[in-house]
Image (cartoon, helix red, strand yellow):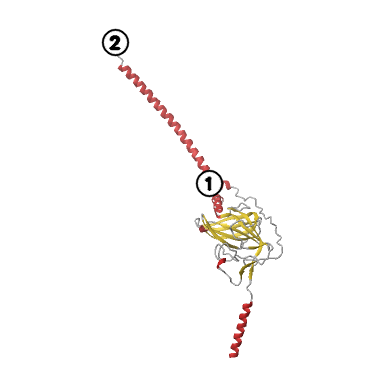
Amino acid sequence: MRKKLKRIVGLAAAFALAIAAIPAQTAKAASGTVYTCSVTPSYSNPVTGEIEDSGGEAGYATGQGMVQSVVYSSGILEVTDSGEYYLTVRLGMMDYASGHSFWVQNVGDSGWSTPAVGQTGSGSDGNGTTADICIQVPSENCVVRASMYVEPMGRDVIFFFYPSGYSEGNNTDMTATMVTATSGSAGSSDQTSAGNESGGNESAGSATSSASTAGGNASLKSSSQGTTTKEQSTGESGKSSELKSSITEAETPSTSDTAVNDATGLSLSTETETEDTDSQKGSLSTAGTIFGIAAAVTISGLILMGAAAGILYLFRKNWYRWGGGEDDDA
């Protein structure tokens, strides 16, 4: 019995030593290039001009204004050497919205696909809380379809945005979380797969191997690897630095002018009010003219009547003095 116990203890000790001898596996960082880009929000589909939100064309002005308030105009695009694209945008008014969902497609495609999504940062502005959202897109020439529940409206709102105007380098305060090494280099992160979660990696500005989504704590995962980073390729990337979007200007609904007018857009509502005011002023002016003429006639008549009464009074008072009575006596 003692021999068996010693044997079991020996095997356990050997197993422990073997586990201790295995080095921690480091998670390789993806190499690539980071670009700063413009992000154009649109209430309608920027390619077709179609409005998918239930507000319809009548709500175009209100919807476009809301989308421009939510989506910031700058973002970053991370392009890995292995050919993956990650677009990071900043969304505002997060205190009033929830349940954010995203779909992506290349410009010209007919279908939408569900991408990997994660939140990589947070902050605040004059309208409340903001969130930096990283979305895996199929290319730089893409469109993102978004949906969110707007609490003051009590319903989901559907809108779009797309990146364009690329310039190499990160000129924003957003953090590039997928590309953490220069294109063509062999870098690695300090994080390990052995569960090394130090407190310094909890800040929104640090490069992490995972990011919580806007709706929960799920990790941002690459569709090809199932992890937040992909082991980099040692070959040349072969990617052109001249990235561009084929969308030169977002399409709007054909009846957008009427829709904006019906929705009382800011500029047109002022114009309509001006027209109404001018009409009212014209009516008041006409009425004032008529009243003035009537008043003038009345006053003139009173003056003439007063003058006649005065003349009669003078004649009556001085009748005898002027010899009127003598003629009667003769």
Q: Nearer the viewer, residue 70 or 182?
A: 182
Q: Give the vertical position of 199 relative to 306 (above or below).
A: below
Identify the secondary structure beneath mark 2. Answer: helix
Q: Nearer the viewer, residue 205 or 87?
A: 205
Amino acid, disc 2: Glu
Question: In the image, 288: left or right of 149?
Answer: left
Residue 55: percent from the left, percent from the top? 54, 53
Q: Nearer the viewer, residue 172 or 319?
A: 172
Q: Residues within 10 Å of mark 2 (few under 14, many from 20)?
A: few
Question: In the image, 319: left or right of 295?
Answer: left
Q: Residue at horizontal 62%, vertical 81%?
A: 15
Residue 231: percent from the left, percent from the top? 66, 67
Q: Residue at horizontal 60%, vertical 89%?
A: 4
Image quadrant in which the N terminus is located: bottom right
Residue 328: percent from the left, percent from the top? 29, 11
Q: Residue furthest left?
A: 329
Q: Residue furthest top?
A: 330
Q: Residues within 10 Å of mark 1 (few under 14, many from 20)?
A: few
Q: Nearer the viewer, residue 117 or 262?
A: 117
Of tags 1 and 2, the one toward the viewer is 1
Tell me the distance, in whole angstroms, between the alpha carbons under discs 1 and 2: 88 Å
Q: Give the vertical position of 195 relative to 72 (above or below).
A: below
Question: Which residue bears the numbered disc 2?
Answer: 326
Which of the 4 image quarters holds residue 79? bottom right
Image quadrant in which the C terminus is located: top left
Which of the 4 image quarters holds residue 123? bottom right
Identify the secondary structure beneath mark 1. Answer: helix
Amino acid, disc 1: Leu
Question: In the image, 185: left or right of 297?
Answer: right
Q: Give the vertical position of 103 relative to 297 (above or below).
A: below
Q: Residue at horizontal 32%, vertical 19%?
A: 313
Question: Which residue bears the numbered disc 1?
Answer: 266
